[in-house]
Amino acid sequence: MVVALLTAAAPLSAPAHAAPQADRQVVGDAGLTIKTTVGISGEDLERLRAQGRQSGTPARPAEPQVADRAAQHDQRQRVPALSLIEGQRAANRQIAAHPQPARPASEALPGPMVAAPIGEQPAAARVTECFDAGGADAGIGRVHNRFTYCARIKLTAEYWRIDNKGIPVEKEGTTTGTIEIFTQGDDKERRVRVFSRIQEDSVDYDWGPFDNIFVAPNVPLSLIGHCSEEFETCHATRGAATMAWVTWDNNSRWFYWDVYNHEVVTEGRDKLSFNRWYVSAFTDSRQYRTIRPGNTAPRLTRCDSATYFQRFGTRYPKACVFAETIPHLTYDLVSDYTDVSLHIWHAQNNPNDTYPMLAPDGVPWPRDKKIPGKFFPGDNTAPGLHRITGELHPALVEANSDHKNGACYGKPPYGHMYQLTGLPVPPDTTIEECDEYPFASTLEGAGHPDPENPDFNFSVEAVNGHDNSVAGGKLIAYYLDDRILAWDAGLEQPYQVNDKFYVNIRG
């Protein structure tokens, strides 16, 4: 029997003639190259070669087969559920090792929302956008945004002759190709849909002149999506998609698996949970037996059941997002909200030149102002912003408003605190509004913490009323588009695991 080795590991270090060792580890991040090992008996191999000689014609594409049973070739090595802190730390490691570049916010994507409708086939425009943006074939693939991921992964399948005990003794050939993965997070269910296929015209055979034409192209290859954690955390639907290599190589159709996250092992008000998913490649049939499947490195998703997301009467009560990226809102300097963009840019880059001052004119400042929220690619340890809402955090929202009004207009109850340090000229309310950063809808806003003993500071500035309205609308849309969860003080280590986001000012 000949065996094929597919593994989520670097190429074997053993000599080409040495028998491979089985390895079914699912954990870790081995990069974007995987290998599989498959075995075939000498008797079966000679029968296939004889069939090729008799036909006298090259291999032809076969019809695709998609299994109905999700348990087919279920070689999953289940791992325990991740706690929130474990999941966040895993995401942080990937973010630091593979920083994603700054991107436009949801307006850069087709349609009004980052979470696109999920169909039987992914939208061609979204696929093109993700792959063309760069990075899909490096690092961890491309986490395009919190709802979109894509990757191209090199696949090497080694086929070995095995003896009557199933032990690999001699390599017969190698087939290589590229797996494409495009995955979408759902904003109404706790699931991601994992699409996969072999990239067209990416397959090459190294079996020898005769076998390259009459044997290797007809060897079947199967792809299937899995989740890594135990069944109480997640499960994947549907069985494997199986076609001959030559069919995959001439195929543009995507096959998919839904990976569902359950509400059984969750934490906090919004029922948070992390899980990982991956794609497995293998060859199993009457003649072939996989010794080691090729598993892509698991990718991390975070799922929730938050009830406060809605737009235009439509509610989004559950969702799964890709955790290995830094959520950030992009504002443009050249825009119809330029006043607000300039204000935020000054607050992030020249905080000491903003109001309120830390001390009146002529009085030494106790320290420099520290204003959080600036986006740095790959660094989510920088001070960020945490969302709050009027429904969930009424006292915090009221405090932010009161301190902003005190710093801008000298209004009570805190106006006396800013008589000598707030805006020297209040906004002209006929055309201007008071803009504050960090936003009023964040934990780090003007009212938190107590300005008399601050960890952070804030900035206020008079801006055009129209600019302020447009920028505020973009912020509201962004919270939904990137699924920014509201602050939950009841979580263990809340500053570690609560959603944190940043603001990127693009010139």
Image (spheres, helix red, strand yellow):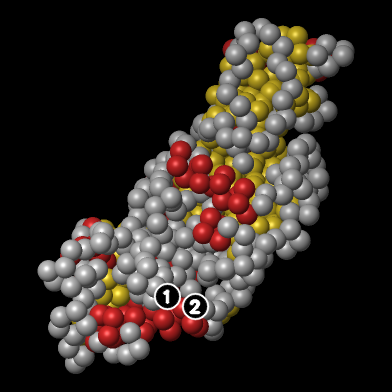
Q: Does residue 84 show up?
A: yes
Q: Mark 2 and mark 1 in contact (Cβ < 8 Å)?
A: yes
Q: Toward which corner of the image does residue 343 lie, by quadrant? A: bottom left
> Residue placed at 58% from the left, 57% from the top?
493
Q: Which amino acid does label 2 sit on?
A: Thr
Q: Is mark 2 on a helix, strand or loop?
A: loop
Q: Where is residue 400 in the image (x, y as percent from the top left)?
A: 39, 79
The extreme left residue here reads: 362
Question: Where, by quadrant of the figure, is residue 134 drawn?
Answer: top left
Above or below — where is 354 with respect to 409? above
Upstream in sequence: badge 1 or badge 2: 2
401 relative position to 238: left or right: left
Furthest-bottom residue in view? 430
Q: Report whether 269 appears left or right of 448.
A: right
Amino acid type, residue under disc 1 in the picture:
Ser
Across and down, in percent, residue 502 comes to 39, 60
Residues 502 and 132: in front is 502
Say which residue label 2 marks. 389
Query: Quadrant of the rendered structure where residue 468 is?
Result: bottom left
Q: Which residue is drawn at 50% across and 83% down?
A: 394
